């Protein structure tokens, strides 16, 4: 017989997670309308990138830096339903806002100069490393989680102790995700829609960990803080759903570097906090393909003096091949869903 006092905390925790999503959606919908009208009245829009597809000329002038209103909406929801004094709440928030600031600086320079390039790549990378190092330090100190072990998702008996290499690899992991999401943000609704399935899987796993559904290799610290993380991730999902309302084809607003940086940072820090680094890599497979396509293109041009793709990253290659933008975005979203399902199966197989 199940006693009521065992059920009540579960119901309350789940209610908090769902309410964080719904309230974040509502706040972001409200802020989005105000933000778009304000940006239009100030005539602040996305500059045209001469190196991009020529058919994107019609997108020039569209309000950008939409991350400003959807990260704000999500954060307000977290303040309502989360506890910012807990590490698994404040570490993700610091990661998001820290990388958000880098992206916002980049967006601001683009708008001021009315050019497609803001911060120099080297300067942006240096700032990402500095913010990432701070987050990694907080991750190891503030959360009480100091494990340097990486475990194979489907077989917990297979693991590697990275030792002193772990913080370095974790930093690379975070900077990779920030830039992978940034690279993917090139079509209407592409980055936001591709991020949601992976974030949903993270929220589900965090909720399961919060209810004690984990194997022996997961530390108690994770179980105690996972529900806090679930609230943060759910709030971002709600904010992204609202953002997609305005960002779907034909987009009324772009997320900008501030939005893509924040999303990438949240995905990475969530994986590190819960020690599901490999699971999240699989779940974010479409971001990996986008990043890989750009890397292959650069290597091909420098070593072979020819392009491997018509244009990098991958979504622009498909555009050059004549595939409609709406079809590319839909197929990427489907791919992201399949990657998340595969990652979920890899995570669950050890319980079967």
Image (cartoon, rainbow, N blue to C red):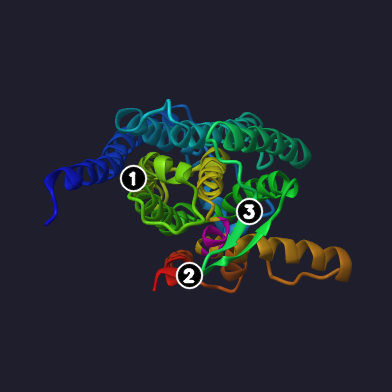
Q: Residue furthest front?
A: 1
Residue 241 locus on image (x, y percent): 35, 49
Toward which corner of the image does residue 18 lie, by quadrant? top left
Q: CA distance from mark 2 to mark 1?
A: 26 Å
Dividing the picture into quadrants, the one containing residue 198 is bottom left
- 195 or 229: which is nearer to us? 229
* Vertical placement of residue 49 versus 293, above or below: above
Q: Residue at x 68, y 44 (%)?
A: 171
**Circle number at residue 238:** 1
Which residue is at 63% across, 46% downward?
174
- Sequence-first disc among 3 and 1: 3
How far across and down, in percent of the image, does residue 255 sit? 49, 43
Quick check: marks 2 and 1 in contact, CB under 8 Å?
Answer: no
The disc at residue 149 is 3
Q: Residue at x 82, y 70 (%)?
A: 306
In depth, the one of 214 and 102 nearer the eye is 214
Picture layout, residue 5 above or below residue 44: below
Residue range in magenta is 277-282
Q: Is residue 130 magenta?
A: no
Tell which circle, 2 or 1, labels the residue nearer the N-terminal end: 1
- Where disc 2 sits, the SS reads helix
- Residue 222 lies, with reference to residue 162, above or below; the image says above
Q: Which residue is mark 2?
A: 346
Element on which disc 3 rests: strand
Residue 335 place in picture, x, y as percent: 47, 69
């Amino acid at each position: 017989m199940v006693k009521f006092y065992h059920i009540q905390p579960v119901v309350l925790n789940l209610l908090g997670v769902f309410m964080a999503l719904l309230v974040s959606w509502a706040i972001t919908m409200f802020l989005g309308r105000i933000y778009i009208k304000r940006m239009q009245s100030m005539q602040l829009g996305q500059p045209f990138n001469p190196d991009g597809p020529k058919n994107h000329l019609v997108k020039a002038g569209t309000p950008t830096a939409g991350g400003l209103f959807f990260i704000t909406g999500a954060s307000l929801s977290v303040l309502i339903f989360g506890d910012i004094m807990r590490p698994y709440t404040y570490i993700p928030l610091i990661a998001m806002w820290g990388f958000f600031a880098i992206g916002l600086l980049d967006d601001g320079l683009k708008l001021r100069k009315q050019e497609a390039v803001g911060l120099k790549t080297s300067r942006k990378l240096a700032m990402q490393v500095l913010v990432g190092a701070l987050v990694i330090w907080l991750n190891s100190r503030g959360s009480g989680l100091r494990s340097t072990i990486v475990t194979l998702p489907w077989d917990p008996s297979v693991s590697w102790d990275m030792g002193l290499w772990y913080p370095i690899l974790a930093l690379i992991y975070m900077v990779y995700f920030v830039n992978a999401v940034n690279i993917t943000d090139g079509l209407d609704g592409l980055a936001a829609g591709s991020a949601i399935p992976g974030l949903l899987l993270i929220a589900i796993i965090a909720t399961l960990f919060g209810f004690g559904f984990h194997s022996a290799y997961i530390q108690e610290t994770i179980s105690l803080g996972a529900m806090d993380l679930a609230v943060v991730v759910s709030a971002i999902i709600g904010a992204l759903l609202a953002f997609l309302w305005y960002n779907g084809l034909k987009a009324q607003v772009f997320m900008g570097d501030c939005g893509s940086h924040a999303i990438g940072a949240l995905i990475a820090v969530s994986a590190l906090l819960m020690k599901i680094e490999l699971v999240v890599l699989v779940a974010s497979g479409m971001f990996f393909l986008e990043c890989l396509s750009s890397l292959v293109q650069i290597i091909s041009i420098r070593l072979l003096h020819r392009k491997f793709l018509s244009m990098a990253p991958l979504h622009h290659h498909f555009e050059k091949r004549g595939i409609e933008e709406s079809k590319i975005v839909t197929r990427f979203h489907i791919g992201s869903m399949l990657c998340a399902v595969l990652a979920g199966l890899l995570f669950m197989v050890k319980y079967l």
